[in-house]
Image: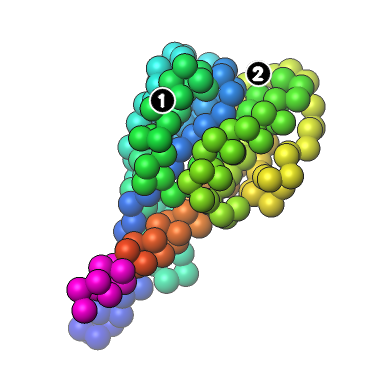
Amino acid sequence: AVGQQLQWKRREVVMSTEVKVLIVGPKNSGKSALANFIADAVQNSENPAQAPTQPTKGCRIVEFDRQIPQKKGNSNISVELWDVSGDRAFEGAWPAIMHGGVGIIYVYDAANVGEEKDLEKWHGWFGQTMGLKDSQVLVMAHKKTDIKTHKGSLPKSLSHAQSVSTTLEDNQSIIKEHFDRFLLQVAQAASENRKKEEDMIAGSNQ
């Protein structure tokens, strides 16, 4: 019975990781609404599309935990989601905001024709500067209201990144499904980065 208990505990092992993720994109694209929904911090949980948001001044940090079921137990990931203003007036703070980031979510307004092309600039300013791989990037083509959207193509630099069409009007579960998939990739990258740092410290002490 003791052996069975230990076996059960091993199956229920929880792997814990801390990650810092940025959510970035043009002004008024819906970043704060998506950040609140992902973090379960929506004021109007009955109708998240109608929940009020304010323009972000510089940056705002939302902290939450996600527990994602895996074959070998649950991955418990502590997330710092940095909701970055799309106003370039705060550009001077970007280096500090990027520091320690291991993942990025780009959001653009799918109703605004051509806005997806702006992500080329945002990726240059953020993702490429941070040295992120495609697996550490998620693109959300966000539909803020029930109006017609266009299906544009992403810039070549983001063509291999995970992308998803999002809306808070209905079928919101797809947002967290894609976020969790992305988060597992980001957590793996964070663990690899930590191991490299530990190896470097160990090597310098020999």
Residue contact at pointers 1 and 2, CB within 8 angstroms: no
Instruction: Specify the amino acid type for callout 1.
Output: Gly
Q: Give the percent coordinates (x, y) of residue 121.
A: 63, 32
The magenta segment is 198-206
Q: Main secondary structure of the magenta part?
A: helix
The N terminus: image quadrant: bottom left
Q: Give the percent coordinates (x, y) of residue 69.
A: 44, 59
Height in image: 75 above or below 138?
A: below
Residue 92 marker: 1
Q: Earlier in the sequence, mark 1 or mark 2?
A: 1
Picture residue at 43% right of the left edge, 42% below the top: 21
Q: Give the percent coordinates (x, y) of residue 33.
A: 50, 24
Instruction: Specify the amino acid type for callout 2.
Output: Thr
Dot 1 crowding, Cα within 10 Å, few <14, some 14–19, many 20+: few
Judging by the rendered image, the residue that carries numbered circle 2 is: 145
Picture residue at 36% right of the left edge, 35% below the top: 96
Height in image: 193 above or below 81?
A: below
Residue 94 vs residue 174: left or right?
Answer: left
Residue 24 vs residue 145: left or right?
Answer: left
* Residue at disc 1, secondary structure: helix
Q: Is residue 186 on the magenta stretch?
A: no
Height in image: 136 above or below 53?
A: below
The C terminus: image quadrant: bottom left
Q: Locate residue 29: give its quadrant.
A: top right
Toward the viewer: 96 or 37?
A: 96
